[in-house]
Image (cartoon, rainbow, N blue to C red):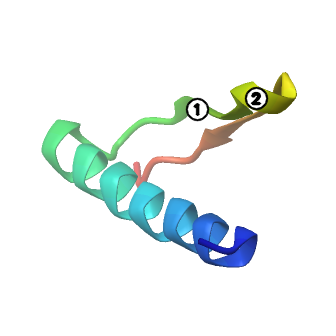
Amino acid sequence: MSMRKFLKQVGVTSQQAIEKAMRDGGAAKDYEVKAVVTIEELGMEHTVTGIIRGEG
């Protein structure tokens, strides 16, 4: 799998999972989020953090 295809898959599937969780759990508040990508063979770990704003 190419790097671009992998990153696209991560983005699309993550967005779908987050949207479902917010629908099921309530989207009225803000949520702290963290995404971690690792490549164990290279000893690489990349973390992105942020806040997803709720609808309320």
Q: Nearer the viewer, residue 20 or 55?
A: 20
User: As rendered, which of 15 and 26 lies closer to the eye?
Assistant: 15
Q: How many marks?
A: 2
| Callout 1–callout 2 Cβ contact below 8 Å | no
Drawn side of residue 20 relative to residue 13, left or right? left
Residue visible at 34% across and 43% down in the picture:
28
Is residue 56 rendered to the left or right of residue 40? Answer: left
Q: SS for tag 1?
A: strand
Q: Residue furthest front?
A: 41
The kind of residue on which mark 2 rests is: Glu
Identified at 58% across, 32% down, the residue is 33
x, y percentage for residue 9?
A: 50, 69
Tell which of 24 and 15 is nearer to you: 15
Callout 2 secondary element: helix
Percent across and percent down for residue 40 are 71, 26
Q: Is residue 39 above or below residue 2?
A: above
Point 72% across, 76% down: residue: 4
Per the image, the residue denoted by label 1 is 33
Q: Name which residue type carries label 1.
A: Val
Residue at position x 47%, y 70% from top?
Answer: 12
* Residue identified by numbered label 2: 41
Which circle, 1 or 2, is nearer the viewer? Answer: 2
Compare residues 23 and 17 and report the one nearer the observer: 17
**56 vs 50: above or below:** below
